[in-house]
Amino acid sequence: MQLWFLTAWRASLNTLAGGWSGEGSRLQAWRKVCLIVTFVLLTTILFRPHLMLPNRVYDWYFVVDITQSMNVPDYQVAGKSVSRLQIAKQSIRKTLSALPCGSRVALGMFTERNVVNVVEPVEVCAHFAALDQTVASMDWRMAWAADSFIAHGLYNALEQAPELGKQIRVMFFTDGQQAPPANPKYMPGYAGKPGDVQGYLVGMGKPVASKIPKLDEKNAVSGYWEQEEVQRFGNFGMAETLSVLAMEQGQHDRNAGHGPGTDLLSNAHLSALDEQNLQRLANTTGLNYVRLEPSAQSSSWATGLGMTAWRWADTDLRPWLAVPAIVCWLLYLLLTFSGSRWVKWLARRWSGIRLRSH
């Protein structure tokens, strides 16, 4: 492209230097006008002009579940097993490349009950390298606890969104694995209004249960979580508040188990995409639930209708100037060779084809 610009620019200089002597015909005058416009546009493009214009942009808060179940390698890419965490990170990095300049991106990581906002909203083009590197560096070892209470984390991310920006959308990547399994009676309620924060709840993994790997410091598999290990946490939970009458009748929860029960704990050492849980959370919060397949692109969700935010943004004018420059250059070539025998021969052939078609 640069070579074409330089060739046209040099031709424009040569014509401008020697083509103004004499009156010339109207055809030559139009040729010179086209060449002058092309020269001015190409010269302007070389200075990389920018201007603040109203743009269609997108503001996103990408949150990644970094708990150990996200290390399950149940994705297949080019014949190789890839973990859910790696697929989530790849998807976000591709989305960063697809967002137009002027868009803003914040990054967060989830584990236990909370989401930590590691990067506040920044402009995607000016800070692309930093955002890309931050996403690539996200790792399960950054987790500060082993628990995974999805509802708490999702609600926490939605609470943070308005503080990050009025037009911030949330894209939360998780497999929906609750660890340790929670008693449904103790699940929190959503305090916000459904739909106030738009976005996507992205389901990771396959619905078929797989073993959860234990990774060492080099990310090599050193074993797998066993059922006995998970059951050690089976009685963890919050006590149910009983009435005075119930307590007088001998019911007391001080020493009672408040976990999910043996049914849920029997497969707690395995991990699968919990679509039922994620769809329920999506309905509760007003988010859109989608499942991330290897062929799916989260960039199409991030730049979809309804996710747009209009804002004045620094706009690169080179594409807008290149189009009229190409048109003027083609018009100049057409006017230059309009009298040649090849152009006349092509015109006759085209006229003959049109006559035969009628």
Image: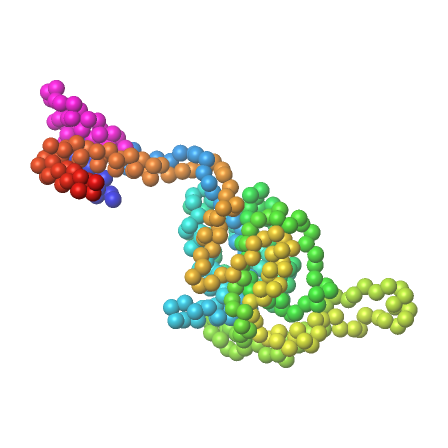
- Magenta-colored stretch includes residue 30: yes
Q: Say whether residue 309 is visible.
A: yes
- Residues 126 and 238: in front is 238
Please report the bounds of the magenta region as a residue range: 13-42
Q: Is residue 23 left or right of residue 141?
A: left
The prevailing secondary structure element of the residues shown in magenta is: helix
Q: Is residue 318 left or right of residue 278?
A: left
Q: Image quadrant for the N terminus?
A: top left
Q: Say whether residue 43 is visible.
A: no
Q: Residue at x 55, y 48 (%)?
A: 169
Q: Image quadrant for the C terminus?
A: top left
Q: Residue at x 90, y 71 (%)?
A: 249
Q: Residue at x 61, y 52 (%)?
A: 286
Q: Is residue 65 above or below residue 8?
A: below
Q: Residue at x 64, y 50 (%)?
A: 194
- Magenta-colored stretch includes residue 239: no
- Of all residues, the one furthest to the front in this rendering is 358
Q: Where is residue 312? Give x, y as percent.
A: 47, 36
